[in-house]
Image (tube, grey):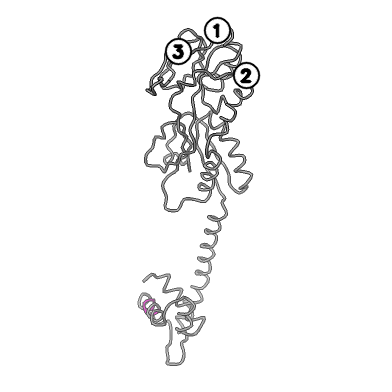
Amino acid sequence: MDRLECDRMFIAVIETSSFVGAADQLKTSSGQASKLVSRLESDLGVQLLKRTTRSVSPTEAGRAYYERLRPLIDELEALDLDIRNIAQSPRGRLRITAPLTFGIVELAPALTEFAALYPDIELDVSFSDRVAHVVDEGFDMAVRVGRPGDSSLVMRKLCAVRLVVVAAPGYLERHGTPEAPEDLGHHSCIIDTNFAELGKWPFRSATGQAGGARVQGRFRFSNAEACLVAAEAGLGLACVPGFVAGEAIRAGRITPVLQAFEPEPYDVHVLYPPSRHLSTKVRLLVDMLAERYRGRPGWEAGW
């Protein structure tokens, strides 16, 4: 029997002056009520109650124990209530790690909406292309594009990201439009140094087989947004994620090419440590992101 259960029953017996009343209050039998108090007396090595066929009253030791115990139980119940309220009314710090470009372009606007909905949550966000160790570095969750990595984490897919090759209309007028990946050898390409294989862009053949094409050019950037800026300026072709290119495509500043050869999209996942009781603030943000990216991503609208 749990000691706390015994203490709660002892308090109920004192306050109702009856085992029957205490049992009714705590939704158990009078026999169980008597057993719990007897166990408590045995543990303490003192008699706490004087029992007669008509009444139950505390001994001197019982009265002293009750007077010290009652405030402790009240404090414990208040603590229980506070913790439940914290779980139900999300508050506190939420630490998030995400890739730099996706974080700035896509996640930051979502997080500002989330912050407006839940003003008691403090957001601590790290945008970096370094893959952080979620648990060891104290993050509550991570957003990752491509291979999610750590298999010990709970993983939920948010959406898929297409890689698109784009160029300014003026560049295509001057140099022509590539019709197949091998044509890129005759073009100036703006290279993102974050690609796994530097100087090679991934493609799929007409039959769906994964492959790639070697590219070259005089511009190299370690950021997809910078590659897009150079492409908009007419300096060459760039291979960038759809969420980076979407607005510029819709505005007509760049044109997608080689769409029939696009590689398999990269999945975007949210990851968090496994827990039997997922914190409310993590669950709320995960659910919000899942709803935001449900279906076709908004950045693909219009192209």
Q: Do tag 3 and tag 1 residues touch (Cβ < 8 Å)?
A: no
> On the image, which quarter does residue 230 sit in?
top right
Residue type, mark 3 in image: Val
Report the Cα–Cα distance between label 3 and label 1.
15 Å
Q: Is residue 102 above or below residue 227?
A: below
Assign a secondary structure to mark 1.
Answer: helix
Which residue is at a point 41% across and 20% down the rendered structure image? 206
Magenta stretch: includes residue 115: no
Taking the image as shown, residue 116 lies to the left or right of residue 287, namely right
Magenta stretch: includes residue 40: yes
Report the Cα–Cα distance between label 2 and label 1.
17 Å
Badge 3 local density, few (<14 within 10 Å), some, or many (20+)? many
The residue to which callout 3 is attached is 215
Residue type, mark 1 in image: His
Q: Quadrant of the C terminus?
A: top right
Taking the image as shown, residue 301 lies to the left or right of residue 263, namely right
> On the image, which quarter does residue 40 sit in?
bottom left
Disc on res. 175 = 1
Which circle's residue, 3 or 2, is located before the other in the chain?
3
Residue type, mark 2 in image: Arg
Report the magenta stretch's main SS. Answer: helix
Report the Cα–Cα distance between label 3 and label 2.
22 Å
Taking the image as shown, residue 16 lies to the left or right of residue 202, namely right
Q: Which residues are magenta?
A: 37-41
Disc on res. 275 = none
The residue to which callout 2 is attached is 253
Q: Is residue 182 above or below residue 144?
A: above
Q: Is residue 285 above or below residue 221?
A: below
Which residue is at a point 45% across and 78% down the rendered structure image? 10
